[in-house]
């Protein structure tokens, strides 16, 4: 196994990104989505320059993206993060590396707050985010 490669999401990555998104949907713990959004919908939703993949042995093993939380100017530096790792590749530190990279790149891109919504039974994501400096501010 080679070292993971962190890089911007490329057009050729969309099929793999959507497959990994489908895996997250199938767990019932990652999102309220019931179907994978189209590539066009994701391109419109995710902030350009804030879309990343982690590649392992030449294959996309996970992805991370930021979405604006509001169109209001006062929220220009606030975004919601999403991160998904291939279900067969958990526990290898890929999520930690990808999330750390996402946070660094968001800061460099002028974002001052990242937030996320995580289901309370998604323990792996809760631990991942808390280790990266996120904190729980409420439950719904």
Image: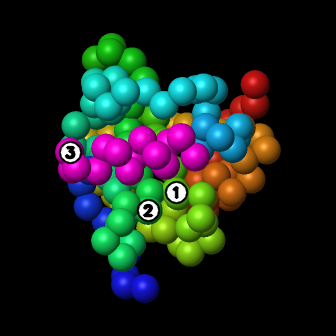
Classify 116 as above or below 86. above
Tag 2 near tag 1, CB within 8 Å: yes
Q: Residues within 10 Å of mark 2 (few under 14, many from 20)?
A: many
Where is residue 14? Give x, y as percent.
31, 44
User: Visible in this render: residue 24?
Assistant: yes
User: Visible in this render: residue 76?
Assistant: no
The quarter in which the C terminus is drawn is top right
Q: Does the magenta stretch include residue 24?
A: no
Secondary element under disc 3, as helix, strand or loop, is helix
Where is residue 97? Give x, y as percent.
44, 67
Pointer 3 residue: 11
- Residue at the extreme top: 72
Kindly identify the residue that appears in the image at 61 percent across and 33 percent down: 31
Q: Quadrant of residue 119?
A: top right
Q: In which quarter of the image is residue 62?
A: bottom left
Q: How crowded is mark 3: few (under 14 residues within 10 Å), some or many (20 or more)?
A: few
Q: Name the mark nearer the viewer: 3 or 1.
A: 3
Pointer 2 residue: 61
Q: Distance between the residues labelled 2 and 3?
A: 16 Å
Secondary element under disc 1, as helix, strand or loop, is strand
Kindly identify the residue that appears in the image at 31 percent across and 71 percent down: 58
Ranked by sequence position, the earlier of labels 2 and 1 is 2
Classify 64 as above or below 96. above
Q: Give the range drawn in magenta.
A: 10-23
Ranked by sequence position, the earlier of labels 3 and 1 is 3
Kindly identify the residue that appears in the image at 79 percent across and 44 percent down: 121
- Residue at the extreme bottom: 1
Q: Left of 34 or right of it: where is 65?
A: left
Kindly identify which numbered label has been placed on residue 85. Answer: 1
Q: How far apart are marks 2 and 1 (CA)?
A: 6 Å
Where is residue 79? Give x, y as percent.
40, 33
Q: Main secondary structure of the magenta part?
A: helix
């Amino acid at each position: 196994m080679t070292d993971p490669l962190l890089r911007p999401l490329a057009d050729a990555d969309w099929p793999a990104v959507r497959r990994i998104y489908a895996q997250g949907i199938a767990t019932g713990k990652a999102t309220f989505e019931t179907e994978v959004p189209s590539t066009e919908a994701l391109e419109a939703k995710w902030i350009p320059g804030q879309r990343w993949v982690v590649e392992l042995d030449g294959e996309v093993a996970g992805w991370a993206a930021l979405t604006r939380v509001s169109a209001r100017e006062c929220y220009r530096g606030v975004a919601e993060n999403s991160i998904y790792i291939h279900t067969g590749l958990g526990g290898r530190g890929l999520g930690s590396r990808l999330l750390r990279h996402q946070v660094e790149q968001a800061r460099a891109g002028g974002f001052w707050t990242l937030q996320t919504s995580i289901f309370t039974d998604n323990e792996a994501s809760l631990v991942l985010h808390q280790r990266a400096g996120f904190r729980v501010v409420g439950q719904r």
